[in-house]
Image (cartoon, rainbow, N blue to C red):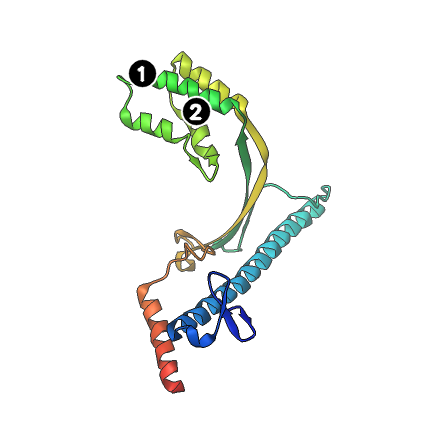
């Protein structure tokens, strides 16, 4: 519901206006958006609670295994974990990734790579040259650590390139770790079915147009019944 004060609705400029001045379609739009965002916040809370519970249960199981084998019980985070159902058709994975950052030497490495590219432009594949330069693109104030580290996979023996790779090594710092949990099951729960990830990212969750139209039809039918 819109922010209301003394019976008046707050607009985008922060002013309060009489509801009679708000078009009916805008009132309906406001109710729709408010309802959907509130529902999304409830769902977000439920997903977060489920994620915390899933991590806790997996780590508790690892602790149980340690106790069974007379190993010291560790209550802090453990490393990667893979747990499977008895018939192997369902799986829970916890993966731990390093959070990579770079210090000022990365800028020097970029300058050294530029020197190399200037020297080798005529003989260097243009596609590789583009991939190299794109690795240093800044997005949201950061470079993509995976692309920077990926430069080391090129089989280039030129001295300037080697110097740049050494600078990247020196510039690389591990700022911590981040744990990811994923849920998978085999297609159709068949023993030899392809692994499918259980998608929990609402933006990435596949939805068919026919599914939307079916729900839309039900909503329209319910509105008609209410009249």
16 displayed left or right of 160: right
The local crowd at label 1, few if under 14, some if 14 to 19, many if 20 or more residues have their Cα within 10 Å, is: few
Judging by the rendered image, the residue that carries numbered circle 2 is: 152
Q: Is residue 11 above or below residue 204?
A: below
Front residue of 54/184: it is: 54
Q: Which mark is residue 120?
A: 1
Q: Which callout, 2 or 1, points to the residue nearer the camera?
A: 1
Q: Is residue 156 visible?
A: no
Looking at the picture, how far across and down is residue 203, in whole percent?
42, 55
Residue at x-position 47% and y-position 33%:
145
Looking at the picture, how far across and down is residue 97, in whole percent?
54, 39
Front residue of 157/110: it is: 110
Q: Is residue 96 visible?
A: yes
Residue at x-position 54% and y-position 32%:
101
Residue at x-position 44% and y-position 29%:
148
**Mark sitting earlier along the chain (2/1):** 1
Residue at x-position 29% and y-position 20%:
124
Quadrant of residue 47 within the rendered picture: bottom right
What's the CA distance linking mark 2 and mark 1?
17 Å
Looking at the picture, how far across and down is residue 55, in whole percent?
60, 51
Q: Quick one: SS at disc 1?
A: helix
Looking at the picture, how far across and down is residue 94, in whole percent?
55, 46
Q: Is residue 154 above or below residue 216?
A: above
Quadrant of residue 227 within the rendered picture: bottom left
């Amino acid at each position: 519901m819109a922010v209301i004060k003394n019976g008046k609705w707050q607009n985008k400029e922060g002013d309060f206006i009489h509801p009679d001045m708000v078009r009916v379609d805008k009132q309906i739009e406001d109710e729709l958006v408010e309802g959907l965002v509130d529902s999304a916040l409830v769902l977000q809370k439920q997903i977060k609670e489920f994620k915390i519970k899933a991590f806790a249960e997996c780590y508790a199981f690892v602790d149980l295994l340690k106790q069974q084998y007379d190993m010291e019980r560790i209550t802090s985070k453990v490393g990667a974990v893979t747990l499977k159902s008895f018939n192997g058709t369902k799986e829970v994975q916890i993966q731990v990734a390093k959070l990579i950052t770079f210090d000022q030497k990365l800028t020097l490495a970029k300058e050294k790579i530029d020197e190399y590219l200037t020297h080798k432009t005529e003989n260097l594949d243009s596609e590789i040259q583009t991939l190299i330069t794109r690795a240093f693109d800044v997005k949201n104030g950061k470079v993509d650590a995976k692309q920077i580290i990926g430069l080391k996979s090129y089989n280039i023996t030129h001295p300037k390139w080697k110097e740049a790779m050494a600078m990247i090594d020196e510039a690389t710092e591990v700022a911590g770790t981040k744990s990811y949990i994923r849920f998978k099951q085999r297609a159709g729960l068949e023993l030899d079915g392809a692994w499918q990830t259980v998608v929990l990212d609402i933006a990435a969750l596949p939805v068919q147009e026919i599914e939307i139209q079916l729900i839309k039809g039900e909503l329209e039918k319910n509105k008609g019944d209410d009249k």
